[in-house]
Amino acid sequence: MESQFIRADMIEATEFPHLVQRYGVFGVPRTVINEESSVEGAVPEEKLLSEITRAVKKAV
């Protein structure tokens, strides 16, 4: 899925411990969506898309 409204950033957890603490990272990858919800670990594409859709609906 590609959209001009979606931005993704990847960080190295050991280099940014303040972000690890801010987002409560316990496992990787951790995907944070709109600062509202997150998915931890490798999840199936359907699960990730479901979480993104749910977060977008909450934001509207």
Image (cartoon, rainbow, N blue to C red):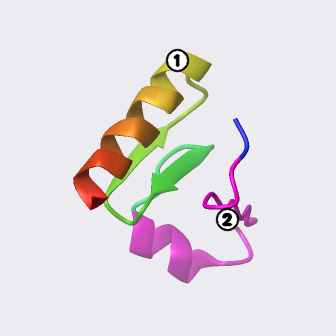
Say whether residue 15 is left or right of residue 33. Answer: right
Q: Residue at x 45, y 55 (%)?
A: 33
Magenta span: 3-23
Is residue 60 shown above or below 46? below
Quadrant in the rendering for residue 45: top right
Task: Check disc 2 and give the amino acid type.
Answer: Ala
Task: Check disc 1 and give the amino acid type.
Answer: Glu
Dominant secondary structure (helix, strand or loop) of the stretch shown in magenta: loop
Residue 24 in picture, x, y percent from top left:
39, 61
Neighbor class of circle 2 (other Cα within 10 Å; few <14, some 14-19, many 20+) is some
Screen quadrant of the C terminus: bottom left
Disc 1 from disc 2: Cα separation: 25 Å
Say whether residue 13 is left or right of residue 46. Answer: right
Quadrant in the rendering for residue 50: top left
What residue did someone put label 1 on? 46
Say whether residue 10 is left or right of residue 17. Answer: right
Looking at the rendered structure, which numbered label has been put on residue 13? 2
Return the residue nearer the eye: 12 or 32. 32
